[in-house]
Image (tube, helix red, strand yellow):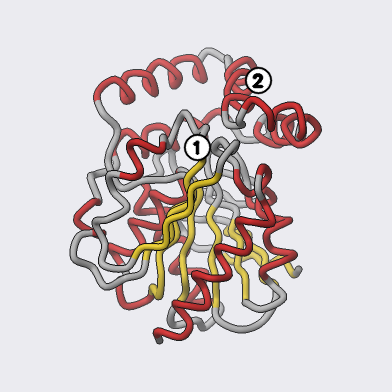
């Protein structure tokens, strides 16, 4: 796994890893994590594919200039990485907030995407209740309340049984999440508040879409996601039992198998 860094005026440093050979898969992490969340997946998927894992600007080793960052900015950072790697087309898969960026990429750069993966993510915008919840969290971040927020949030991402089975991983993720700057957390929540409805990207679209759904996910719930899984013409829908919002930890082998099946379809459809 090789790490690379590029930069421009908006992104003083864009850091990402490249592993394997073949058709390119870009894996985008969620809030408030970094690319390391995909390490186990990369180990398996890079045996057959060229896997690129960015640290989204503001996380890990990647940075952004100014105080604001939009979901569209994150999509643009992915385009810059692909351009630097001289890759014309890729399959873009995103977890949670990373899925919002993957959808934005599909909208902004439709000629550069072979397939769209939504891992515990969805195309609809925040409702007013969710926006208000995020605004209250932003005020908490501004008052230095990141640590209790992270301490409470991370365990909620896992199914009850998973919290016990993967206790060490839960603690490690908490520690890594705490490295994300308060300013980044604020920027991400504002970006999510302001993101538009992108269900139009799915409707009557020939772009293949992968859906990974956790039966015990309290954030991207089965009920809400299943309403969107028939919008596109080609859908690969997988529902994992006893799984929350973190299938790359809770069901990593099955996730890689299903992503591989989707990758094979997209590769052959070229």
Q: What percent of the width, then of the height, locates residue 45?
A: 66, 69
- Residue at point 33%, 45% (across, down): 226
Q: What percent of the width, then of the height, locates residue 193?
A: 32, 33
Residue 268 falls left or right of residue 235? right
The residue under label 2 is: 151
Q: State the image quarter where residue 254 is shown.
A: bottom right
- Residue at point 46%, 86% (across, down): 268
Of the residues under marks 1 and 2, which one precedes in the sequence?
Answer: 2
- Residue at point 31%, 25% (across, down): 131
The residue under label 1 is: 215
Q: What percent of the width, then of the height, locates residue 242?
A: 60, 36
In the picture, the quarter occupied by the N terminus is bottom right
Q: Secondary structure at mark 1?
A: loop
The vertical placement of 147 against 51, above or below, is above
The vertical placement of 154 against 98, above or below, is above
Q: Is residue 257 visible?
A: yes
Q: State the image quarter where residue 163 is shown.
A: top right
In the picture, the quarter occupied by the C terminus is bottom left
Question: CA separation, marks 1 and 2?
Answer: 23 Å
- Taking depth in this image into account, of 82 and 69 the one nearest to the observer is 82
Q: Secondary structure at mark 2?
A: helix
The vertical placement of 181 against 82, above or below, is above
* Of marks 1 and 2, the one in the foreground: 1
Instruction: Farthest residue to the right: give it.
Output: 168
């Amino acid at each position: 796994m090789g790490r690379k860094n590029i930069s421009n005026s908006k992104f003083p440093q864009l850091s990402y890893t490249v592993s394997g050979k073949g058709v390119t898969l870009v894996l985008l992490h969620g809030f408030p994590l970094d690319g390391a969340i995909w390490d186990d997946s990369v180990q398996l998927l890079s045996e057959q594919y060229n896997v690129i894992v960015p640290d989204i600007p503001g996380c890990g080793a990647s940075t952004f200039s100014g105080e604001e960052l939009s979901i569209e900015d994150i999509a643009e950072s992915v385009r810059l990485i692909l351009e630097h790697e001289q890759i014309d087309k890729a399959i873009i898969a995103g977890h949670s907030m990373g899925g919002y960026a993957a959808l934005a990429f599909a909208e902004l750069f439709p000629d550069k995407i072979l397939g769209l993966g939504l891992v515990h993510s969805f195309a609809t915008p925040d409702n007013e209740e969710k926006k208000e919840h995020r605004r209250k969290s932003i005020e908490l971040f501004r008052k230095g309340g990141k640590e209790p927020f992270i301490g409470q949030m991370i365990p909620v991402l896992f199914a009850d049984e998973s919290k016990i089975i993967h206790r060490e991983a839960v603690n490690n993720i908490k520690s890594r999440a705490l490295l994300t700057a308060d300013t980044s957390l604020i920027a991400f929540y504002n970006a999510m508040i302001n993101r538009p409805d992108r269900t139009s990207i799915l409707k009557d679209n020939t772009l293949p879409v992968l859906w990974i759904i956790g039966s015990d996910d309290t954030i991207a719930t089965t009920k809400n996601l299943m309403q969107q899984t028939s919008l596109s013409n080609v859908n690969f829908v997988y529902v994992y039992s006893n799984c929350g919002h973190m299938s790359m930890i809770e069901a990593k082998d099955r996730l890689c198998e299903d992503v591989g099946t989707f990758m094979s379809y997209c590769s052959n459809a070229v």
